[in-house]
């Protein structure tokens, strides 16, 4: 039973109230009375509007479902369908041409291009790894990943393998030749780097002296001109440091004495309170808020065992360098942080309003995460010792799962009310808009317009977008197989449209245009070969699953000058909304029994592998083995598409309930086997009827059609609470 305190006509969980009173409000200029009274007024004013928006979602969905019931197969006419969407308000009116007017945006979002990490803020160790991933060792990223093959004696081993190391060095020298080419020769031939008369001079193994083709790329150093310990370069707006550590075993065998190349990697990180966490009550939310406070105060630390030793991780201090004219300057060592709040759908029992209802969790997140961020942007936090997040004095919030411009407008109003509550100037809170719902995609320009003075980010989310695609058009007919959905034209149009709208609305040089996650953290060679597509698409950020991936993905931004590319992309013909509205139905839904069984098994295994950790262990994001034992980074978005796909096939009698149940039971045994090394794991197959995780997985499919927009949160939250009560 949650202990609560009555304050300003709200019932607040005692532990959350104590945290805000003792840890958050002190150090701000917000009094307790002002905060709680203003919070209560905000909840009372905005909760009804929040509820009304959810009702609109349901009404629109019912109208669309009824339309598809009447217009299936040959009776479906696209032109009539599009007119119908306009009539019901699903397809919004054109807002005309405009440019966003967002100001006070940090360079990492406006004028720099580079990788973005997304991590569950409830995991302090992951959060620290991410915020410290602003810089990464290129040598370590290469040596420890499959980018460097194990051929010709270059195997990974417990001890340093010189053959593998030589491949790493050769790769790194090639990187230097591409980014800071020499007037003659190659960095492979270098034997000494020194600065003479303000110019970097490279002595080659032939005795010849060489110089940088673009000497302005050298921006600083550490050590002495004759014997630098670091040389700092800037290329395509990103920094990297060539390091010379005489004590390093690598440097001792390197002709030029280079020990590593340290690359600016994760420019930004999203500290996630949403899809990658399992936060269902006040205790869970408190962990998220405590870690967010530690990140904003610069005090978060985590002690853990690694290789038998205790390690304490903290946030990195900024690095100091010397310019060529002798002046000292600092370089930021931490990733710029967003916080991702939850969307408009869920409520949370951490706070009960005056009507006896749980308050909308998105409202609670907006108020409390912004209050916490005052510890970063308040004037009293401007001392040099403070590990500053936003140098521009802004608070960055990613707002997910919004459906259309009216919902974006509501989030904008919510942020205005929070700014008033916290006595902040208008538009201090910046908004990141996730373009991951169908009604947002087809109305993206109008959505941006609804937050045009504070938007700093639009980002595609393929998995959630596909889940909503299936649910919205659930009654239109059976969907193609999941692998084939990726090949349908709406997806490429959707991805292009995100860039086209961003560029048309003036994002280039002001805000981020982002792309989605690389889901296979162990396949870095594959990522290096293919994820450059996100950069070539015109995105100035894209999501990666780890610090190592961030360092490797950063190489793509050195290959492509994104901002120059964006100027070219502005001239192309924009993506067609008609293509985005194309429903990915199966052309010929007459699969063999084996094909149907394989598709069900693939979906069932993914659902169970994720749900069992969510329900039993409260893990919202982890590397989950797929049906082929390949580890995939999974969060609720993956679960949404798989459960909706099975629900669609069930509804259209591609499969039967008996087949779904048989597949689920079969795959439960597979998932149990995959998790057998986890001592805390509870097997599902030993008692299907009583196992909460297994029953949750079944409900996600058998009740998938009736879930709001196909979201998995309501069932997950409900059953996680039941599990915790046990």
Image (cartoon, rainbow, N blue to C red):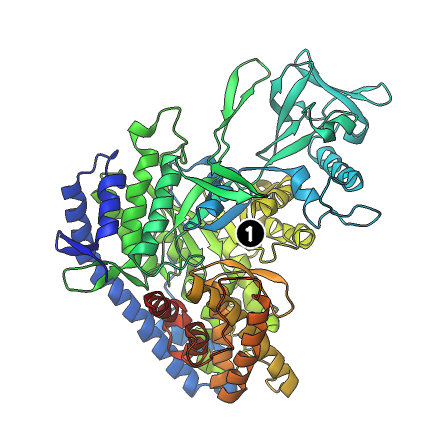
The location of residue 472, given as percent across then percent down, is 43, 74
Q: Nearer the viewer, residue 45 or 228?
A: 228
Give percent across and percent down for residue 50. 26, 62
Query: Disc 1 on helix, strand or loop?
Result: loop
Residue 703 pos. (x, y %):
40, 79
- How packed mark 1 is, by other alpha carbons closer than 10 Å (few <14, some 14-19, many 20 or more), is many
In the rendered image, the vertical position of residue 55 relative to residue 162, given as above or below: below
Foreground pick, 624 / 557: 624
Residue denoted by label 1: 545
Q: Residue furthest right?
A: 206
Tell me which corner region of the image, top left, top right, bottom left or bottom right, holds residue 1: bottom left
| Front residue of this view, candidates 573 and 48 | 48
The image quadrant of residue 48 is bottom left
Q: 359 or 267, which is in the foreground?
A: 359
In this picture, residue 292 sits left or right of residue 215: left
The x, y position of residue 669, in whole percent, is: 56, 75
């Amino acid at each position: 039973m949650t202990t609560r305190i009555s304050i300003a006509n709200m019932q607040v969980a005692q532990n959350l109230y104590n945290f805000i009173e003792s840890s958050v409000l002190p150090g701000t200029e917000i009094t307790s009375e002002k905060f709680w009274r203003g919070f209560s007024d905000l909840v009372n004013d905005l909760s009804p509007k929040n509820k009304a928006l959810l009702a609109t979602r349901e009404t629109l969905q019912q109208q669309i479902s009824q339309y598809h019931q009447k217009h299936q197969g040959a009776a479906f006419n696209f032109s009539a369908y599009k007119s119908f969407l306009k009539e019901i308000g699903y397809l919004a009116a054109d807002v005309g041409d405009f440019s966003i007017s967002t100001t006070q945006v940090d360079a990492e979002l406006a004028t720099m291009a580079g990788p973005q990490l997304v991590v569950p803020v409830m995991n302090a160790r992951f959060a620290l790894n991410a915020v410290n991933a602003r810089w990464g060792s290129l040598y370590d990223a290469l040596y420890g990943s499959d980018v460097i093959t194990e051929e010709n004696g270059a195997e990974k081993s417990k001890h340093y393998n010189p053959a593998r190391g030589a491949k790493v060095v050769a790769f790194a020298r090639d990187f230097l030749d591409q980014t800071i080419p020499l007037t003659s020769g190659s960095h492979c031939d270098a034997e000494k780097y020194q600065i003479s008369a303000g110019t970097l001079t490279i002595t080659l193994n032939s005795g010849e002296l060489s110089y940088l083709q673009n000497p302005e790329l050298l921006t600083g150093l550490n050590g002495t001109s004759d014997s630098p310990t670091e040389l700092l370069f800037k290329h395509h707006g990103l920094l990297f440091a060539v390091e010379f550590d005489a004590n390093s075993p690598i440097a001792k065998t390197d002709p030029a004495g280079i020990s590593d190349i340290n690359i600016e990697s994760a420019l930004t990180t999203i500290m996630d309170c949403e899809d990658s966490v399992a936060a269902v009550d006040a205790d869970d939310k408190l962990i998220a808020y405590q870690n967010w406070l530690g990140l904003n105060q610069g005090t978060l630390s985590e002690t853990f065992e690694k290789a038998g030793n205790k390690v304490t991780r903290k946030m990195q201090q900024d690095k100091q360098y010397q310019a060529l004219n002798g002046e000292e300057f600092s370089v930021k060592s931490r990733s710029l942080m967003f916080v991702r709040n939850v969307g408009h759908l869920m409520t949370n029992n951490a706070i009960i309003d005056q009507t006896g209802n749980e308050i909308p969790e998105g409202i609670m997140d907006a108020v409390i995460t912004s209050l916490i961020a005052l510890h970063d942007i308040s004037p009293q936090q401007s001392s040099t010792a403070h590990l500053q997040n936003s140098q521009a004095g802004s608070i960055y919030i990613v707002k997910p799962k919004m459906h259309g411009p009216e919902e974006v407008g509501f989030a904008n109003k919510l942020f205005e009310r929070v700014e008033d509550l916290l006595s902040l100037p208008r538009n201090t809170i910046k908004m990141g808009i996730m373009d991951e719902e169908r009604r947002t995609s087809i109305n993206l320009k109008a959505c941006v317009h609804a937050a045009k003075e504070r938007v700093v980010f639009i980002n595609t989310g393929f998995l959630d977008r596909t889940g909503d695609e299936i649910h919205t058009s659930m009654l239109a007919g059976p969907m193609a197989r999941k692998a084939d959905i990726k090949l349908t034209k709406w997806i490429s149009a959707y991805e292009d449209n995100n860039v086209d709208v961003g560029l048309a609305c003036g994002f280039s040089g002001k805000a981020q245009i982002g792309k989605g996650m690389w889901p296979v953290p162990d396949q870095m060679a594959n990522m290096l070969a293919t994820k450059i597509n996100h950069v070539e698409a015109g995105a100035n950020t894209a999501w990666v699953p780890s610090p190592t991936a961030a360092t490797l993905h950063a190489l793509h931004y050195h290959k492509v000058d994104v901002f120059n590319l964006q100027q070219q992309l502005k001239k192309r013909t924009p993506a067609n909304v008609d293509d985005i509205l194309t429903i990915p139905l199966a052309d010929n839904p007459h699969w063999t029994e084996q094909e149907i069984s394989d598709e069900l098994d693939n979906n069932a295994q993914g659902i169970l592998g994720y749900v069992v950790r969510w329900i039993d262990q409260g893990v919202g994001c982890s590397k989950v083995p797929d049906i082929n034992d390949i580890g995939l980074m999974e969060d609720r978005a993956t679960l949404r598409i798989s459960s909706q796909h099975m629900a669609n096939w069930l509804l259209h009698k591609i499969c039967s309930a008996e087949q779904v149940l048989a597949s689920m039971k079969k795959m439960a045994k597979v998932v149990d086997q995959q998790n057998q090394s986890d001592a805390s794991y509870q097997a599902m197959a030993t008692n299907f009827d009583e196992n909460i995780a297994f029953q949750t997985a079944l409900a996600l499919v058998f009740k998938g059609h009736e879930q709001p927009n196909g979201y998995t949160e309501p069932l997950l939250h409900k059953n996680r609470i039941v599990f915790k009560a046990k």
